[in-house]
Amino acid sequence: MPLYSIGMRLARNADSFDGAAVSASGAAAVPEGRTLIVYFSQTGNTQGFAEIIQEMTGADIFRIERAEPYSSSGNSQTLYAEALQEYRENAYPELRACPEDEGINVQDYDTIMIGYSNWWASIPAPVRTFLSHYDLSGKTIIPFCSMGGGRFGQTISAVAKLAPDSTIKQGLCVTYASYDRDEIAQWLADNSLI
């Protein structure tokens, strides 16, 4: 199977960039009020990360799941091929459930922590579906990502495009299943969540 995503990308760091993307209006939202952790985890890595965040913050939590599961629950060529196809097609797969099905009203939260794995340098398609379903205007979004080496890739810009009137704060990415609890605690403190 040919892989069309292999290539070279030139990038330049923004001058004096602190790692936080701010909405076009320039509003500097500070996390306050209620926090909701929303995450997608196919292999369990992001789930472990989300559970540590929930343990440290006491925030409510919701797991995004595809209505039709992927063919493989673990890392496999089949899973990556399915994810690549969804990426190329800009797919929005149906989700198994919405937060409202579990008594969670997304609009009741000021801060949404969104977790995912870096798939093909972008967010997994189920995360795209979730973000496109809700108006997150005026909310603070804090991303967290598990990855195999690509860091955030283009995931932050993908989230920003789907939640254009929100404030995106400093995220944290970790290598699959290597959770440094001190690093996570410091990141949460930096984002005023603990």
Image (cartoon, rainbow, N blue to C red):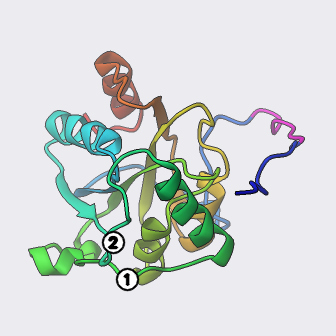
Give whichever of discs 2 and 1 has the lower sequence position: 2
Give the secondary structure at mark 2. loop
**Which residue in the structure is indicated by mark 2?**
66
17 relative position to 100: left or right: right
Looking at the image, which residue is at 83% across and 35% down?
15
Nearest the camera: 69 or 62?
69
Could you tell me residue 179's position as x and y percent?
34, 24
Per the rendered image, the range of residues in magenta is 10-16
The quadrant in which the C terminus is found is top left
**Which residue in the structure is indicated by mark 1?**
94
The residue lying furthest to the front in this view is 1
Could you tell me residue 108's position as x and y percent?
22, 72
* Residue 132 in sight from this viewpoint: yes
The quadrant in which the N terminus is found is bottom right
The residue lying furthest to the left in this view is 103
Q: Amino acid at mark 2?
A: Arg
105 relative position to 152: left or right: left
